[in-house]
Image: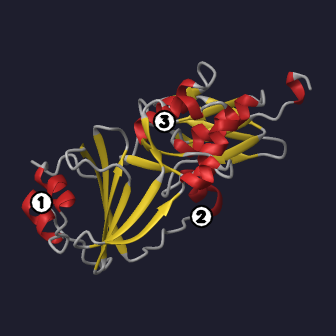
Amino acid sequence: MNVQDMISTLVIGGGIGGLSLARELAVRGLPVTILEKAPQLNPVGAGIIMNPNAMRVLERNGLAEAVRLDSWPYLVRETCDSRGRSLAMRDYRPLYEAGKLSVGALVHRAHLLDVLYRSLPPAAVRFNVGVRSIDVLSDRVRAETGRGEVFEADLLVGADGIHSQVRSRLFGEIRPRYMGYRSHRLIVDNEAGVRHFTEFLGRGQRIGLVPISAARLYVWTTFNSPQAQPPVFDSVSRFRDAFRQFTDARIARVFSQLRSMDGVI
């Protein structure tokens, strides 16, 4: 196939989804351009759980080794009650050893984004580029940026998040559906010595402790909350108090490290 016959792709959004697609296209020698409105890589969130099926994809496209260099193996998942008593344990090691699953990885989102970005051809990602208009023509798509630049391609992919400009401009406004709960994410030192993904279940609340290296811990919370009444966590003491039903020492060690809400997403 010569260059003229190759399908070109324009991706709006340079997050994990957009960069992952660009990697798959680049591996196959297909031209791709990513437009990202942020001035640089901007990982939204804290950690990410790369399940075995995701790591299998990265093994196939050559990025698994780089991701695993700064991660923690996803070997076991334990579920506990709010007091830390073990309720269930899922040990994936027999499946890994039998070759039935690729070994999962627990990773910081910034590291995953960096690996994806560095795997792409030079200048594939255009930062600080906001899209002003999108036109779907008979034989191509056309996007004009806020600076007046024009990009054309055979295929347009919207990977610009839950409030997607691409989706709203092509299909109209579609409001996200609130699912009844809220979440927090943060990274702390692994002073609690957590060595595997551990989830704590409480009444209407959950807390997850996920080691992403020997020294760092990804922490997430979810809690039921009416959409019209968002809670106000303007201090660390209020945040801690909201999860006071969790009495396990590991969670206490996590909360004891918080000095402000600045690092809580």
Determine whether 226 is above or below 114 in the image.
Answer: below
Picture quadrant where residue 219 is located: bottom left
**Circle 2: element type:** loop
Q: Look at discs 3 and 1 and give the one toward the viewer.
A: 3
Q: CA distance from mark 2 to mark 1?
A: 36 Å
Identify the disc placed on residue 24. none
Q: Measure the C-alpha gap from mark 2 to mark 3.
A: 30 Å
In the image, is residue 39 above or below residue 164? above
The mark nearer the N terminus, 2 or 1, is: 2
Residue 220 in percent (x, y) is at: 32, 58
Q: Which residue is mark 2?
A: 172
Q: Which residue is mark 3?
A: 113
Q: Which image quarter holds the N terminus?
A: top right
Q: Is residue 6 left or right of residue 205?
A: right
Outermost residue to the right = 1
Q: Residue at x 68, y 52 (%)?
A: 100
* Residue placed most toward the observer, 85 or 206: 85
The first of marks 2 and 3 along the sequence is: 3
Q: Secondary structure at mark 3?
A: helix
Where residue 199 sits: x, y (%)? 35, 64
Which is nearer the eye, 111 or 6? Answer: 111
Residue placed under numbered mark 1 in the picture: 234
Q: Is residue 199 above or below residue 15?
A: below
Helix, strand or loop under label 1: loop
* Label 3 CA crowd tier, 10 Å (few <14, some 14–19, many 20+): many
